[in-house]
Amino acid sequence: MKKIKYFAIIAASIFALTSCTDIVEVDDLKAKENKPSTGAPTVDKVVLATDAEFPIEGANFEQVVRIEGTNLGDITSLKFNDIEVDSKEVYSTYDMLLAPIPRALPKEVTNTIYITTKHGELSIPFVVSIPDLTINGLKNEFTQPGDTTVITGDNFDLYGITIEEAIVNLGNLPVNVIDATRTELTIEIPANATPKSTLTIKGANMDEAYKLTYMDPGVSQLFDFNNWPGSGAFTHSSQFPDAPKNFLCDGTLEGQPEPLVEGGKYIRFNNSVKAWGCMVMWAGYITVPAEVAADLSSYDLRFEICTGAKFPISAQARIILGDYGWYPSKGGIPVNTYGGWQTVRISADTESLLPSSIDPSTNTAFKIIFSPESAQDFDLSMCNFRFVHK
């Protein structure tokens, strides 16, 4: 087994625990490294390479573990479950093994480490946490036929969602997979795709296909952009004389984004808001369908956004939806759609998004207010607000 790759880790541990005068301890370690293994391996404990003090009973993919014991040299095989570690990734001495947990799904989960040397073999209980497949959805659910879009998520590679192995269909139409990474799958929407089709994704290591909706109009639209802002509703567009009427756009004026769909309309705020300011994009009443009110957890509030390339949404940008403080860049990474449309999904049962008790027979108060934590310049367009079954 190769004993070089993780030598730097061992060396760092040595010098962190010994002084320059502790030559005897260093010599002892070197002696152990060269001490021959003559019998079957034994294990005293397993620890993380980054925290050797505390024994562990399990770890995650790609974490480096240290197995301590005796007769651990002359190793011929090291497995976590049924996944063997590449021999080039293992550092082996008489009293220690150092190796990363491979990032690969086992075919059989045994929760066991298997150690085989030239002088014997040993198995010990050890749980490797296996990450779930995450699929968030289409980056833009209303991508036009013939255009490309991205499906986002995580652990695509583990579950065989790759260029070579992923099977993607839209209805009964095969979908061309253009690129694949751990977190993104780039696809081309078929030229003859139809709205409300079901998109299915099947990786080589998946038992069942994952289903997404395409161009799903939902069970209701919150706003009528042909009657904006609507009866009893208002905006603060009077404070911004350069804004289109009530922020309503159709993409025909210079500098405006193209509509989400041909002939569509959207609202756009292209101006500044002071820290903790209050710019009302819309305030009024919406209709919440009875099926949504009865089971909020089964529905999303979905809409599409578009940012100007020079105006990404920062981590300090807050937009009030209902009474919910939505931070589009909550993770700290600015959101920038670079002039394209991107779908946003917020679970309808998110606290303060809607009242805790909704009477579908009466209209529900709702608002969209720009109120950032620090002064912000915005160029944000929004449209297609709808309730969609998850």
Image (cartoon, grey):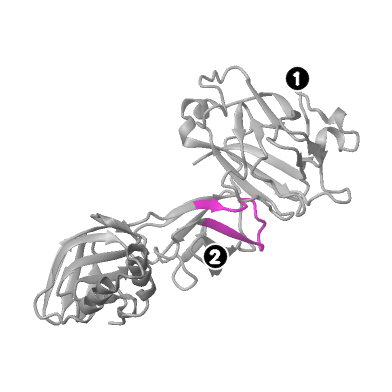
Q: Which residues are magenta?
A: 136-152
Residue 138 spot, x, y in % from top left? 57, 53
Percent across and percent down for residue 36 are 16, 82
Camera-side residue: 121 or 146? 121
Query: Which residue sits at x=23%, y=61%?
Result: 46
CA separation in Å, label 2 and label 1: 45 Å
Q: Position of residue 234 (x, y in %)?
A: 78, 24
Residue 106 visible? The answer is no
Instruction: Please give the residue where the numbered disc 1 appears in the rendered image.
Output: 232
User: First in sequence: mark 2 or mark 1?
Assistant: 2
Give the residue type at disc 2: Val
- Give 20 or 31, whichever is nearer the viewer: 20
Give the mark count.
2
- Neighbor class of circle 1 (other Cα within 10 Å; few <14, some 14-19, many 20+) is few
Closer to the eye: label 2 or 1: 1
Report the residue marked by disc 2: 175
Q: Position of residue 1 (x, y in %)?
A: 27, 82
Q: In the rendered image, which quarter is residue 364 located in?
A: top right
Relative to 46, residue 317 above or below: above
- Quadrant hosting residue 316: top right
Tell me: residue 131, above or below residue 23.
above
Question: Regarding mark 2 in the picture, which secondary structure is present there?
Answer: loop
The tag on residue 327 is none
Q: Residue at x 65, y 37 (%)?
A: 385
Write the residue at 43% across / 60% down.
155
Q: Amino acid at mark 1?
A: Gly
Q: Is residue 246 left or right of residue 47?
A: right
Q: Residue furthest left?
A: 39
Q: Quadrant of residue 113?
A: bottom left
Element marked by disc 1:
loop
Q: Nearer the viewer, residue 28 or 211?
A: 28
Residue 4 lies in the magenta-colored region: no
